[in-house]
Image: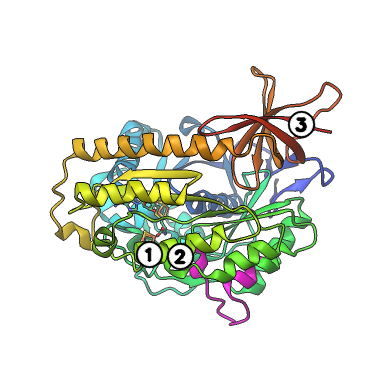
Amino acid sequence: MRRIVLQTGAAVKGKADATRVILTSYMSGDTQKTFYLETFGCQMNVHDSEKVIGTLVQQGYRQVETVEQADLILYNTCSIRDKAEQKVFHRLADFKKLQAQGKRFGVLGCVAQQEGDKVFERAPHVSLVCGSASYRNLPEMLVQIEAGKRATGLDDRQTDECFETEFTARTNPYRGYITIIEGCDKFCAYCVVPFTRGKERSRTSESVLAEARQLVDLGYSEIQLLGQNVNSYKDPAGKKSFAELLAAVGEVPGMRRVRFTTSHPRDFGRDIVEAIDATPTLCDHVHLPVQSGSNHVLDAMQRLYTREQYLERIGWMKAATREISITTDVIVGFPGETEADFEQTLNLLEEVGYDGVFTFKYSPRPNTPALELEDAISDQEKARRLEVLMSRQREIQINQNKKHIGKTSEVMVEGHNQARGQWIGRTSQNKTLNFTAPDDATPKVGTYADVTILSTFPNSLLGQMVI
Ligand code: SAH
Ligand code: SF4
Ligand code: F3S
């Protein structure tokens, strides 16, 4: 007899207690099919994996921790840069020999969508290739591969549905993720996402709000709304703008923190800043990727905004009542980026005063218009620019973080570092704040604490819990 208990999210032992049973499956006998899943890439992939795990468990599979224990080995892949794409083929090569034991292999996500049937040529031991827009068909595909056949699920940029499932195995015990929009219609010259994730499509605000309420009922107090361009959200029912949806999620009773990522500058309206100002549960952090500080490069990248328009949006955030922390992404070495262009990116960093910057060396990607441009900047020069940018940003962050000394911030307690005798917390601004607690106080992971900041580093703050 087999009994599978699948919970749509987390069962909570008392709301303040973050000890949760995330997903349980029971099985008598040892005939249950098992799967191993490794995830690469962005937060949307991580959350897709939570939905894929739920789908597999619902189909009678049990998740295991190692490839050796698994009947089915899955990789949820990323193709944003060449290195990310290569990772999955390395993994598949490493474990090819396990095919002799009857194990099956599957490639999911962005590389699956991008390469399609070519995956079978590059790695003939793979039997499942499925892009993210086809996950709803996974149950049928599993039946096919169990019968010894190959299964492919690819999207042709036609679908206007998001992948919603009631079976989500929430693997982050403290933060509940909700995808509100999938795909991308922007087609930046360097980017694979429009090809790997399909056309832009949003969920109704009603279904997003229902999921937010459900997560609060399950004990989550922090929620992150996700989308490749989360703020390009368009309610198919026409009821709410993105800013209105943000505010409504923030007002769900029991909600403590709402985050959202990633915002595209072109669609970033002043109403988002107004919503943050008016709704205390909305976190005071915006990730707004700029990619370059030079109009010439922004134009070649087809980013759809100028440096001046980007700075106007930064101005709105700086004028807000709340102190909004701002982070960004930068690509160095895009074809044609001159030293003068690069200088403009450096001085933009100073002008904005970012709290964090993710920097990437331009990587030519299949299908993208930038492939036509000569990738004339050497890897060595890209590495140099990356190095210069990172060290400049390190100084900026040191100064940014220093401003917090003496202030008290609320943190969500995320862990304990036994060796250091410190607790690990995250502020609303998304900064890591490590802290010590008085002897008579034991902060609980998953709850909130007030911490006074005593010293700062480029990437974290250090403080003491206030009783
Ligand atoms: N939709 C978001 C970004 C999503 S991709 C936006 O438009 O801002 C995440 C980041 O990966 C991008 O911000 C960019 O900095 C980086 N990236 C994307 N394609 C890249 C490429 N071909 N080479 C290097 N970095 C890339
Ligand atoms: Fe890629 Fe541009 Fe879409 Fe962002 S907006 S996902 S960078 S194509
Ligand atoms: Fe990578 Fe696909 Fe995300 S390419 S960054 S996993 S959308």
Mark sitting earlier along the chain (2/3): 2
The answer to whether the residue labelled 1 contacts the one labelled 2, judged by CB atoms less than 8 Å apart, is yes
C-alpha gap between disc 3 and disc 1: 41 Å
C-alpha gap between disc 2 and disc 3: 37 Å
Respond yes or no on whether mark 2 lies under 8 Å from ligand 1. no
As displayed, is residue 275 above or below residue 118?
Answer: below
| Three-letter amino acid code of the residue under disc 1 | Glu
**Looking at the image, which residue sits at the far right?**
440
As displayed, is residue 453 above or below residue 323?
Answer: above
Left/right of residue 254 with respect to residue 382 in the rendered view = right
Respond yes or no on whether mark 1 lies under 8 Å from ligand 1. no
- Looking at the figure, which quarter contains the C terminus? top right
Residue position for label 2: 312
Mark 1: which secondary structure?
helix
| Three-letter amino acid code of the residue under disc 2 | Glu
- Place residue 280 in its image quadrant: bottom right
Residue 209 forms part of the magenta stretch: no
Residue 72 seen from this side:
yes
Residue position for label 3: 465
- What residue is shown at x 51% (from left), y 66% (from top)? 231
Residue 453 at x, y percent in the picture: 68, 33
- Looking at the figure, which quarter contains the N terminus? top right
